[in-house]
Image: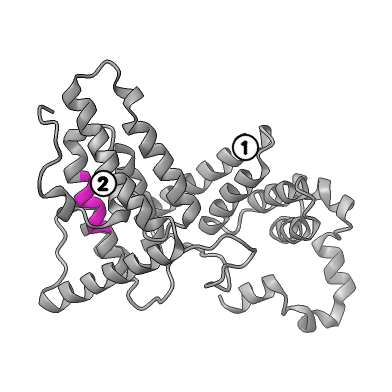
């Protein structure tokens, strides 16, 4: 790239801060911060010690004039809500004028995707584009435009849903009564879902080896959002909570792991320590009172299926 200043139209063209950072519109503050740190490192002057001054100056301007302002807009919950509202308004205005016709391949695929797989496809598409967004400045323009299109298409598909953002501060999100579960409808979608969840699961293992329990919790919660029926995810999350002396949370997830798989080795290992009975024993104890005790947290999940 020969020029050292940003193209004059970039500041107006890239008005979507989610697209500039390369994150989904469902991202919470943790994801926003994590992505911002990664992008800031990619654009840091130390990365361009051997580059010519034009490239170094261009990277600095991208950070100062695009990335930093985008982060400032999204680092607070109020700012994220305002920009989601602005993007939704844009979608409604465009829909009144003409049918949404994205140019990007991924956005077009998302527009025609089965409803049950939309969330997984969208997040995977965002991750795929974000990986290339700041690796080569020549591609930034086209990649960021594709990210913006994906956001608009996703918001159009979710127009009837009031809440989009994730709130991982508790067991149940403030805007959801149950974790989001994605039901793949094609082999392709199933592979994407499985790989995405397994990626979070593997990262959680790495964090736990380092004693970073809180980060492991976040990764496992992400995995469960995608594949809620994996006992190993629940069991490991229970252990991560136990390592932080959060026995109540640990009990909830270990118990759920045993419900999903009574033979889960990790869940059984810690069940005795917490006085958790196997699912079969609980059923025998409850007997005919089962119907009176299905109103708990996971009972709510079943009742909504």
Q: Is residue 173 above or below residue 8?
A: below
* As drawn, 138 above or below 32: above
Q: Residues within 10 Å of mark 1 (few under 14, many from 20)?
A: some
Residue shown at 28%/71% (left/top)?
Answer: 88
- Residue 211 on the magenta span: no
Q: Quadrant of residue 35?
A: top left
Q: Quadrant of the C terminus?
A: bottom right
Residue 66, label in figure: 2
Q: Which mark is residue 207?
A: 1
Name which residue lies at 51% across and 63% down.
Answer: 181
Q: Please tell me whether mark 1 or mark 2 is closer to you in this view.
A: 2
Left or right of residue 145, residue 9 in this image = left
Q: Earlier in the sequence, mark 1 or mark 2?
A: 2
Nearest the eye: 116 or 29: 29
Image location of residue 194, percent across then percent down? 49, 48
Residues shaded magenta: 143-150
């Amino acid at each position: 790239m020969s020029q050292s200043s940003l193209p004059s139209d970039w500041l107006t063209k890239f008005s979507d801060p989610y697209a500039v950072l390369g994150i989904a519109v469902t991202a919470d503050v943790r994801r926003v911060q994590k992505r911002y740190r990664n992008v800031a490192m990619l654009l840091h002057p130390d990365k361009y010690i051997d580059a010519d001054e034009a490239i170094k100056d261009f990277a600095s301007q991208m950070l100062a004039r695009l990335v930093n302002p985008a982060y400032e807009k999204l680092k607070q919950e109020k700012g994220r809500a305002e920009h989601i509202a602005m993007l939704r308004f844009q979608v409604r205005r465009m829909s009144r004028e003409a049918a949404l016709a994205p140019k990007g391949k991924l956005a077009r695929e998302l527009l025609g995707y089965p409803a049950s797989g939309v969330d997984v496809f969208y997040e995977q598409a965002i991750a795929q584009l974000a990986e290339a967004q700041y690796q080569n400045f020549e591609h930034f323009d086209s990649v960021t435009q594709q990210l913006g299109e994906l956001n608009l298409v996703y918001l159009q598909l979710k127009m009837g849903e009031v809440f989009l953002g994730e709130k991982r501060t508790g067991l149940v999100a403030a805007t959801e009564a149950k974790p989001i579960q994605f039901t793949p409808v094609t082999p392709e979608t199933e592979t994407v879902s499985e790989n995405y969840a397994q990626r979070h699961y593997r990262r959680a293992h790495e964090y736990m080896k380092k004693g970073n329990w809180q980060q492991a919790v976040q990764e496992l919660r992400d995995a469960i959002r995608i594949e809620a029926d994996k006992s190993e995810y629940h069991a490991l999350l229970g252990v991560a909570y136990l390592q932080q002396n959060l026995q109540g949370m640990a009990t909830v997830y270990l118990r759920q792991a045993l419900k999903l798989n009574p033979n889960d080795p990790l869940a059984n290992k810690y069940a005795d320590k917490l006085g958790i009975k196997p699912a079969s024993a609980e059923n025998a104890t409850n007997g005919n009172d089962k119907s009176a005790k299905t109103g708990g947290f996971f009972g709510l999940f079943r009742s909504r299926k």
